């Protein structure tokens, strides 16, 4: 049975999980949600259909919510989601939100998984975990992806449960995030160490960055707050106000910059 995995990624964690799942399920193919958000109506996948993406503010990224709301799943026989997260307690909201969307489309959510990896969200009070912990977190994510692949291959029903599934979106003000995320990029800026390499614009999954006079300009149109521009900048010149000046940067070491660029084309 064909297995189509639609993924959304910023710094590579979700792409790595999608790749690991695909390795364990025969006849799998990967499709970028961000690269196809404007032609999602062209898709009508059959067989097993998965959606892999990060948890944002204890909920679905805006782009993911729009994608799964628009895609035609009439011919899908088994639907699942796999959501990457960092901090404990951040694994919440996506299962219940996705269930509601699929139910409105007359389709059941057969399985839902939360996959912990290295946390890249540095806009609040925390930083990237110490480098010494990254290896164990990546291995944990790989093993969880292998488990997901087995469940998906057997088309079993399975739901990871989180104690914060319903309270998490309230505590993290998910509705406010969803309604303001596109225009709430005004705090992003580049410092004098910018080398005008264009990488931030190239890896932005929604083409929300223009290069003007060799400097990035955030357009306040389609920002998802994925932080790809900030984390992947080779000179670490991109900041989010004063919050991120002393914070570390992160990219999944198993995913290349070329793969991240390709995901957004």
Image (cartoon, rainbow, N blue to C red):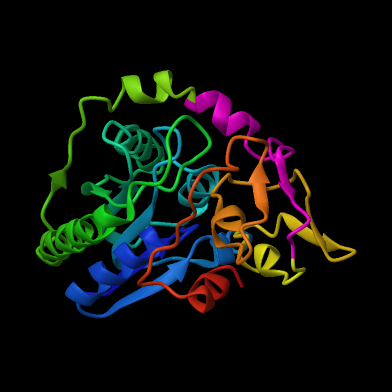
Identify which residue is drawn at 61% across, 62% down.
233
Residue 46 is left or right of residue 123, and the answer is left
Occupied quadrant, residue 25: bottom left
161 left or right of 233 in image: left
75 or 10: nearer the viewer: 10
Q: Quadrant of residue 20?
A: bottom left
Question: Relative to residue 108, is residue 257 depicted above or below?
Answer: below
| Chain part drawn in magenta | 174-194
Classify the position of the N terminus by image quarter: bottom left
Task: Please state which of residues 98 and 219 is positioned toward the viewer in this rendering.
Answer: 219
Residue 103 image point, x, y percent = 34, 38
Q: Is residue 182 magenta?
A: yes
In this orientation, does residue 79 appear?
Answer: no
Instruction: Point out residue 109 in the picture as x, y percentages from the top left corner.
Output: 27, 45
Please identify the quadrant where the C terminus is shown.
bottom right
**Residue drawn at point x = 22 percent, y = 57 percent:** 141
Q: How many marks?
A: 0
Question: What residue is rendered at 44% in x and 62% in y?
Answer: 251
**In the image, is residue 49 above or below residue 162?**
below
Instruction: Give percent across and percent down for residue 246.
Output: 55, 43
Q: Nearer the viewer, residue 77 or 216?
A: 216
Residue 122 in view, yes or no: yes
Q: Residue at x 20, y 61 (%)?
A: 145
Q: Is residue 134 above or below residue 183?
A: below
Rendering coords of residue 194 (x, y %): 74, 62
Q: Is residue 164 magenta?
A: no
Residue toward you, 11 or 72: 11
């Amino acid at each position: 049975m064909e297995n189509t995995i639609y993924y959304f990624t910023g710094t590579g964690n979700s792409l790595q999980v999608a790749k690991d799942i695909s390795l364990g399920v025969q006849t799998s193919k990967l499709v970028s949600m961000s690269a196809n958000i404007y032609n999602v109506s062209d898709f009508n996948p059959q067989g097993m259909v998965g959606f892999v993406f990060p948890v944002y503010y204890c909920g679905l990224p805006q782009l993911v919510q729009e994608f799964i709301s628009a895609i035609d799943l009439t011919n899908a026989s088994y639907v699942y989601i796999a959501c990457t997260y960092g901090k404990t307690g951040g694994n919440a909201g996506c299962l219940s939100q996705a269930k509601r969307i699929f139910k409105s489309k007359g389709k059941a959510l057969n399985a839902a998984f939360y996959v912990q990896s290295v946390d890249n969200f540095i806009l609040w009070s925390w930083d990237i975990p110490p480098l010494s912990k990254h290896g164990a977190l990546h291995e944990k994510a790989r093993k969880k992806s292998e488990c997901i692949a087995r469940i998906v291959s057997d088309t079993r029903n399975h739901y990871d449960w989180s104690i914060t599934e319903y309270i998490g979106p309230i505590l993290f003000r998910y509705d406010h995030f969803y309604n303001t995320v596109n225009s709430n990029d005004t705090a992003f800026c580049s410092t004098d160490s910018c080398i005008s390499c264009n990488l931030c614009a190239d890896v932005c999954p929604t083409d929300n960055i223009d290069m003007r006079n060799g400097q990035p300009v955030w357009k306040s149109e389609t920002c998802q707050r994925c932080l790809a521009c900030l984390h992947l900048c080779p000179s670490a010149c991109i900041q989010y106000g004063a919050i991120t000046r002393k914070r570390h940067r992160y990219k999944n070491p198993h995913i290349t910059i070329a793969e991240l660029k390709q995901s957004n084309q």
